[in-house]
Image (cartoon, grey):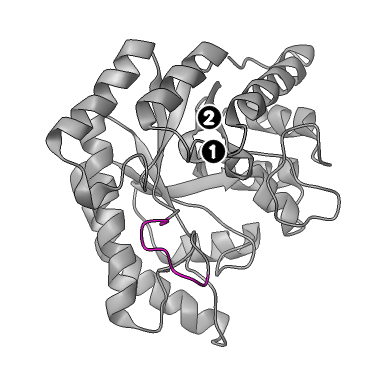
C-alpha cells in the first residue's frame, strides 16, 4: 500500500507549491483537487495541465486520485462541498455536477490518473431514500459510460448526511448498476461516523474498494476530519483489514480541515500512520 496526501488541505497554496511541500515531507503520491484553486476542469488551459504534469515529475510524485467531490468553484451557500449534487430537484442545476464529473474524468485521463472520486447522491431534502436512489442511478449512468470511454475509474464516496452513508446502502446501490469502471472510495472516517466499524466494513466490501481516504474522527462520531491519533479510530485494525483483503492501492490522507497549517498536519499524519503500520508489519510507504 502507498501513502498520499490530498491537496484540498492546501487551499492557500498553488498546486505546484503544494506538491513541492508534500514531496519534501516525504509523500509518494498526491490527490489532486479538481476544483479551485488547483485544477477546476472547466477552465484549465493546456499549459496549466502541463504545469501540473511538470510539477509532479519534478518532485517525483504520483497521482493517487482526482477529487471531483468538492465544488468550491460553484460556491453554493448551502454547502460548498456537496452542491450541486447528483439529485438536485432542479435538473439544470444537477447537470452542473454531471458535466463537472465528465470533465474530471477526461482530466484524469489527460494527467494519467487511474480514478476520480465523487459524492454519493447528495442530501435527500425531504424526499424518500428510494426516490433519490432512482434519480441518482439515472443521472449516474451516462457518466459511467463516459468513464468507460475514458478508461478512468469513477469511485463513489459514501458520506454522512448524503444519500449513500453506510456499507449496506452502498451495497444496495452497487447491485443496481454494474461496470468495471465504477467502484468505491472507502473513507475510513466516514464509515466510523455512521456507525460502521471500519475493519468489518472493509472485509465486507473487499475488492469493491479501489481507493481509500484516511482521517481520524472523535469518539462522538461527529463528522470533522482530525489528524490521526486525535480521534477514536483504531488504525492498526483498519490497516490490517486492508492488508487481509489484498488491497495494494493508495491510502490518501484527507485533512481539508487543516488548511491553516497543512504542512504540520501532513507531516504528523504521515509519521503517525507509518509508525502504526511498521509496528504491525504492514507494508506501507
Q: Residues within 10 Å of mark 2 (few under 14, many from 20)?
A: many
Counting from the top left corner in percent of width and height, residue 103 is at 24, 51
From the image, which quarter does the C terminus lie in?
Answer: top right
Pointer 1: what residue?
A: 9
Q: CA distance from mark 1 to mark 2?
A: 9 Å
Counting from the top left corner in percent of width and height, residue 105 is at 27, 46
Mark 2 falls on what kind of element? strand
Q: Which residues are magenta?
A: 71-78
Counting from the top left corner in percent of width and height, residue 276 is at 76, 20
User: Is residue 173 or residue 121 the one in the foreground?
Assistant: 121
Tell me the residue at 86%/49% (across/down). Answer: 219
Where 7 falls versus 271 (above or below)? below
Counting from the top left corner in percent of width and height, residue 227 is at 71, 35
How many marks do you count on the picture?
2
Depth-wise, is mark 1 or mark 2 nearer the camera? 1
From the image, which quarter does the N terminus lie in?
Answer: top right
Do the residues under discs 1 and 2 have CB atoms within 8 angstroms?
yes
Tell me the residue at 56%/80% (across/down). Answer: 129
Q: Is residue 41 left or right of residue 218?
A: left
Pointer 2: what residue?
A: 5
Where 89 falls versus 245 (above or below)? below
Any magenta on residue 73?
A: yes
Amino acid at each position: 500500500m502507498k501513502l498520499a496526501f490530498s491537496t484540498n488541505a492546501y487551499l492557500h497554496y498553488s498546486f505546484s507549491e503544494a506538491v513541492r511541500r508534500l514531496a519534501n515531507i516525504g509523500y509518494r503520491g498526491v490527490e489532486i483537487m479538481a476544483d479551485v484553486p488547483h485544477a477546476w476542469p472547466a477552465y484549465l488551459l493546456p499549459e496549466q495541465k502541463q504545469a501540473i504534469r511538470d510539477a509532479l515529475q519534478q518532485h517525483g510524485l504520483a497521482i493517487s486520485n482526482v477529487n471531483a467531490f468538492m465544488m468550491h468553484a460553484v460556491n453554493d451557500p448551502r454547502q460548498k462541498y456537496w452542491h450541486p449534487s447528483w439529485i438536485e430537484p432542479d435538473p439544470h442545476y444537477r447537470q452542473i455536477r454531471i458535466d463537472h464529473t465528465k470533465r474530471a474524468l477526461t482530466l484524469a485521463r489527460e494527467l494519467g490518473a487511474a480514478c476520480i472520486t465523487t459524492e454519493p447522491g447528495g442530501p435527500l431534502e425531504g424526499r424518500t431514500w428510494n426516490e433519490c436512489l432512482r434519480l441518482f442511478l439515472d443521472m449516474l449512468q451516462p457518466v459511467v459510460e463516459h468513464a468507460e470511454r475514458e478508461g478512468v475509474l469513477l469511485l463513489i464516496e459514501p458520506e454522512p448526511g448524503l444519500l449513500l452513508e453506510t456499507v449496506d446502502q452502498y451495497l444496495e446501490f452497487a447491485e443496481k448498476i454494474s461496470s468495471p469502471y465504477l467502484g468505491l472510495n472507502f473513507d475510513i472516517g466516514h464509515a466510523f461516523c455512521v456507525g460502521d466499524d471500519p475493519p468489518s466494513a472493509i472485509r465486507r466490501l473487499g475488492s469493491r474498494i479501489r481507493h481509500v481516504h484516511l482521517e481520524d474522527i472523535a469518539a462522538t462520531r461527529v463528522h470533522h476530519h482530525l489528524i490521526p491519533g486525535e480521534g477514536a479510530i483504531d488504525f492498526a485494525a483498519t490497516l490490517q483489514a486492508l492488508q487481509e483483503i489484498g488491497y495494494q492501492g493508495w491510502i490518501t490522507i484527507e485533512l481539508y480541515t487543516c488548511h491553516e497549517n497543512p504542512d504540520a498536519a501532513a507531516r504528523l499524519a504521515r509519521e503517525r500512520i507509518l509508525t502504526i503500520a511498521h509496528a504491525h508489519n504492514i507494508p506501507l510507504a
